[in-house]
Image (spheres, coloured by chain):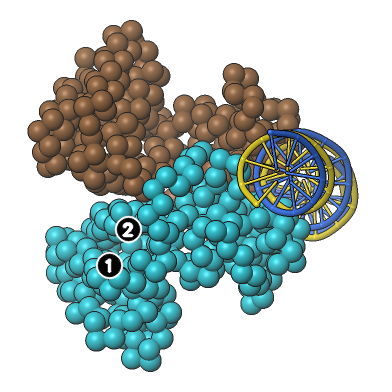
Chain colours: A brown, B cyan, C yellow, D blue
Amino acid sequence: MKQKPPLKLTLEGLDPNLTVNQRVYRSLRNALMCGAIPPGRALTIRELAAQLDVSPMPVREALRQLAAENALEILGNRRVQVPKMSAMKFQELYEARVALESHAAERALPYIDPSRIDELKRIDAAIDAAYLEGDHEKVSICNQRFHRCLYEANPHQVTLPLIESLWLQLGPFMRLATSQLDEHYQVDRHNEAMDAIRKQDAFALRRAIAADIRDGNAFVVSSGLLEEVMDQPQAAAAAPRRE
Amino acid sequence: MKQKPPLKLTLEGLDPNLTVNQRVYRSLRNALMCGAIPPGRALTIRELAAQLDVSPMPVREALRQLAAENALEILGNRRVQVPKMSAMKFQELYEARVALESHAAERALPYIDPSRIDELKRIDAAIDAAYLEGDHEKVSICNQRFHRCLYEANPHQVTLPLIESLWLQLGPFMRLATSQLDEHYQVDRHNEAMDAIRKQDAFALRRAIAADIRDGNAFVVSSGLLEEVMDQPQAAAAAPRRE
DNA sequence: CGATATTTTTTGTGATCACAATACGGCTCG
DNA sequence: CGAGCCGTATTGTGATCACAAAAAATATCG
């Protein structure tokens, strides 16, 4: 039951004038986003500290921070693990994304200026390029960058942190959405979004963003990729106590 | 500019078999929710630790946790403060509440059983009672309880933590919404919501929740209560660096 | 007298240590 | 052979300390 692969992490390649805490946080966050840590995997402070070659202290803070963002789960016995996924929860996360992100897009719309449109175009091109190269990791990252760039146009930002929390929870499974998108890749919803932006058509923008998100979801669900990573229907798992 | 009232906090009355960290966290969270700490107030670890009579360690973790929930702000110079509010940000927070909470209500609707309806009725009665007593603090708390009870019906909870983050950010100002609601108190939107639930009418429920939220907002804005607590239009405040 | 430079103090960060609670392993007993 | 018990090891928590960076206060120069 307890999964114990060595869990290779590192702080190398991270801006060394950041605090140790920040480096640990990013390293962990990155690992989670890429699905490098399997759901249900128990994380101990000392193990991570030894792995990253730092004292337990910054690790503690990073774990607590990630737990506050719902990227990790603190069980009643004070143990920390990557939350497990269920089909229903997956669905809820995606529907929450649709609700939040279409809202964020609409609120950002009036603030989008030509230079940001250029930036969006540039990112979209990068996505297509990465797609042609077959670099799914990069597609996923650039896709997020596209969405973030859009929502960030709104200078009074309150939704982006919430959206990122959802991304983080989906992180371990997002890569599935792009892992096999051969010819299946969506008709370019991003272009629909760009059109809506140019026309300042809020409703069309909402629709484009919602469709973009749902496309990825539909693919993952239909492909059955999800079941592989989910915990089996062992009905009554030890109820995680939410703090 | 630097506000330095003694900032009275305490851990008394908190379940003593909780960890120190949890007690500190709750104490701070509560203070923020009640607006006991003015926006822009700088918080230092040692000051809080001395005030609460604990070591700096649990305070550090609590601060970081609250920062991750957007209840506190970590400036570039690593200093922590209660985020300042602006009229636009206030508006954004409320619109985000509408979007997220009406969504959460809709997703919870199919899971609401008679016993939960009873619970909701009970809470609503408590609100009316507190209102008649003029206990605005209690009205506010019970109102939150009502919303939480509704959204919690959904067993695959992903939105509630995000919603609570919004509540926390609005916390210092929420009390304004109920501070003077004399005869101004909204036509009971909660009853509209209850009707929608009984009829399993998702759209009506969304409308009722949205109206309930917007009522409070409209009151605060129109009454001009907000300006008192906001920082003046000092255009270029030191840009908080988001981590 | 006002602006800049320098010293002093405060503050966050990270490491180490001590302790209590929990989990794990082996043991005994049925 | 299996379930319950107990001892050991591991883990999270919280306190204390050392250090470097930032802020505040003071001194210095124009």
* A132 and B194: which is toward the camera: A132
Same chain shared by disc 2 and disc 1:
yes
Q: Locate residue A204, reporting x and y percent.
A: 11, 37
Q: In which quarter of the image is residue A1?
A: top right
Using residue A238 as the reference point, say whether residue D8 is left or right of it: right
**Local crowd at mark 1 within 10 Å, few (<14), some, or many (≥20)?**
some
Residue topped by disc 1: B221
In the image, which disc is placed on residue A216? none
* Residue A188 x %, y %: 18, 22
What is the chain letter for disc 2? B
Residue farthest toward the bottom in the current orientation of the protein:
B133
Question: Is the residue A27 above or below the residue B223 in the image?
Answer: above
> Residues at badges 2 and 1 in contact (C-beta under 8 Å)?
yes
Which image quarter: residue B203? bottom left
| Spot occupied by residue B202 in the image (x, y as percentages of width and height) | 17, 60
According to the picture, the residue beneath numbered tag 2 turns out to be B87
Q: Can residue B158 be seen in this view?
A: no
Q: Residue at x 64, y 27 (%)?
A: A17
Q: Distance between the residues labelled 2 and 1?
A: 9 Å
| Amino acid, disc 1 | Val
Please, is residue A128 above or below residue B88 in the view? above
Count neighbours of disc 2 (C-alpha within 10 A) and say few if under 14, some if 14 to 19, many if 20 or more: some
Outermost top residue? A133
Q: Which residue is painted at 24% across and 70% down in the image?
A: B222
- Residue ID at (65%, 34%): A19
Query: At which x and y percent is residue D16?
Result: 87, 53
Mark nearer the N terminus (2 vs 1):
2
* Chain to which the residue tagged by mark 1 belongs: B
Please name the residue shown 35% across and 22% down the image. A142
Kind of element beneath mark 2: helix
